[in-house]
């Protein structure tokens, strides 16, 4: 099974289209969106190609392939535009005998992990910074942000496949990688 992870779209049609191009290239079995779909948030600048309504339309076109959680910038109004559920604070996915706990990162986070077993995966967005590490026996992951990366990181997404989590830039560079053993 191959999964693609994106986070922090913040209404950028430009970067969502780039992510969907990578989705078509990568050919994953599903797309996990870690929140902050349409609103840029009061602390962020407007991202390239800011068009929340068009973002919703693009995502609705692939709604059956999406698993999603709510970010701190998402609201019930956003859910009204989307044809797939995204208001849960977290979701859990069974992946090759492990549990993936996916959340945005403003509740549970890498610094405040939920109860997970050794070897399970915790993945969040929210910080806009890529992470691929182990903490307390749990793989802690973050694909970075597709639209508003921070700490001088490029726009990025994550791929989980073949026993490895990799954060990639849209230029094809591997930013972070960790073997899931």
Image (tube, rainbow, N blue to C red):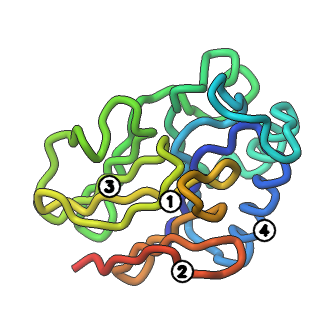
The answer to whether 72 is drawn above or below residue 112 in the figure is above
Which of discs 3 and 1 lies nearer the camera? The answer is 1
Helix, strand or loop for disc 3: strand
Residue in front for this viewpoint, 63 or 87: 87
User: What numbered label is drawn on residue 143?
Assistant: 1
Helix, strand or loop for disc 1: strand
Between the C-alphas of marks 2 and 1, the distance is 11 Å
User: What numbered label is drawn on residue 174?
Assistant: 2
Q: Earlier in the sequence, mark 2 or mark 1?
A: 1
Query: Decide: marks 2, 1 in contact (CB < 8 A)?
Result: no
Residue at image location 57% in from the left, 32% down from the top:
85
Residue in front for this viewpoint, 168 or 103: 168
Residue at image location 40% in from the left, 83% down from the top:
162
Total numbered circles: 4
Between the C-alphas of marks 2 and 4, the distance is 17 Å
Q: Earlier in the sequence, mark 2 or mark 4?
A: 4
Q: Earlier in the sequence, mark 2 or mark 3?
A: 3
């Amino acid at each position: 099974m191959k999964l693609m992870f994106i986070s922090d779209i913040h209404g950028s049609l430009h970067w969502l289209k780039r992510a969907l191009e990578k989705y078509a290239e990568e050919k994953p079995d599903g797309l996990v969106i870690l929140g902050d779909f349409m609103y840029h948030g009061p602390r962020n600048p407007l991202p390239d190609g800011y068009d929340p309504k068009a973002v919703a339309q693009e995502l609705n076109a692939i709604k059956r392939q999406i698993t999603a959680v709510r970010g701190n910038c998402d609201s019930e109004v956003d859910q009204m535009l989307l044809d797939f559920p995204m208001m849960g604070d977290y979701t859990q996915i069974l992946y090759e005998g492990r549990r993936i706990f996916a959340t945005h990162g403003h509740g549970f986070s890498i610094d405040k992990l939920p109860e997970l077993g050794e070897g399970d995966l915790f993945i969040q967005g929210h910080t806009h910074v890529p992470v691929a590490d182990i903490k307390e026996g749990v793989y802690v992951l973050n694909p970075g942000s597709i639209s508003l990366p921070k700490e001088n990181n490029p726009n990025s997404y994550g791929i989980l496949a073949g026993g490895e989590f990799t954060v990639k830039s849209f230029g094809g560079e591997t930013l972070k990688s960790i073997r899931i053993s």
